[in-house]
Image: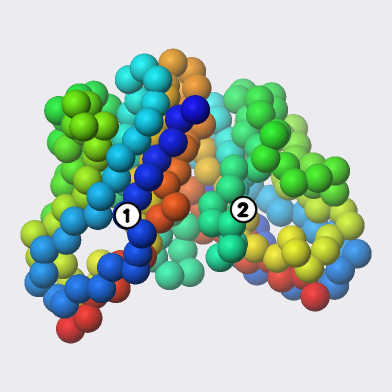
Amino acid sequence: DAGVIQSPRHEVTEMGQEVTLRCKPISGHDYLFWYRQTMMRGLELLIYFNNNVPIDDSGMPEDRFSAKMPNASFSTLKIQPSEPRDSAVYFCASSLDRDGQPQHFGDGTRLSIL
Amino acid sequence: GDSVTQMEGPVTLSEEAFLTINCTYTATGYPSLFWYVQYPGEGLQLLLKATKADDKGSNKGFEATYRKETTSFHLEKGSVQVSDSAVYFCALTRGGGYNKLIFGAGTRLAVHP
């Protein structure tokens, strides 16, 4: 079975540009999570969705960040405008809506803002 | 609130040594417990899990037992290999429709030949 698919794997862009990260969860999974990982702050949960509805976005750093899930098989995380401090690895994960079910992670997008 | 505490790394071992990475948790109710592993340049992979007290999760020679009386879920392996070098994360979910994972800070393991 295909796992969580993220694109692009790497993104390098200049500050001020809009960045869009994409995620395709595992088919049939009810939850989708976006994380950010940096050396300084470790792994941070940004936002998560249940059945395409945002449940908790308290981890989104500021208004420059937005996330959408227009259908069960696709989600985006957008940064506009981007800043150098947004440089990080962004992970998407999905899981079933059942107790004890693990989250399955994608390979991540390594984002560098110059 | 819910939290997970892991031993600080890095942990440096020689090949074939015994590994223990300590993990303790604070949570309401009856959480499910997980160990994830992250190899360099990759995403997190589920290593093992346990969903109730006294359950033992195991995979690839790694084991961890859900100890409710000590609120612990320590990771062990009898004989580590160079290929086990990675970052290991302990995590919990509270369940009951609350599927958010609470992660520990991660422990870096380096195994030398």
Residue A67, labelled with which disc? none
Q: Residue at x 9, y 72 (%)?
A: B16
Left/right of residue B107 with respect to residue A11 in the rendered view: left
Residue nearer the viewer, B51 or B53: B53
Left/right of residue A32 with respect to residue B46 in the rendered view: right
Q: Are marks 2 and 1 in contact (CB under 8 Å)?
A: no
Q: Circle 2 sits on which residue?
A: A36
Q: Secondary structure at mark 1?
A: loop
Position of residue A44 relative to residue A71, above or below, is below
Q: Secondary structure at mark 2?
A: strand
Q: Chain of mark 2?
A: A
Q: Residues within 10 Å of mark 2 (few under 14, many from 20)?
A: many
Task: Tell me residue A9's x, y (percent).
Answer: 61, 65
Q: Name the amino acid type tagged 2.
A: Arg
Left/right of residue B80 with respect to residue A97 in the rendered view: left
Whether residue A6 can be seen here: no
Task: Tell me residue B50's x, y (percent).
Answer: 25, 33
Q: Residue at x 22, y 49 (%)?
A: B75
Residue nearer the viewer, B77 or B59: B77
Q: CA distance from mark 2 to mark 1?
A: 22 Å
Q: Chain of mark 1?
A: B
Q: Quadrant of residue B82?
A: bottom left
Q: Residues within 10 Å of mark 1 (few under 14, many from 20)?
A: some
Q: Name the amino acid type tagged 1.
A: Met
Q: Residue at x 75, y 64 (%)?
A: A85
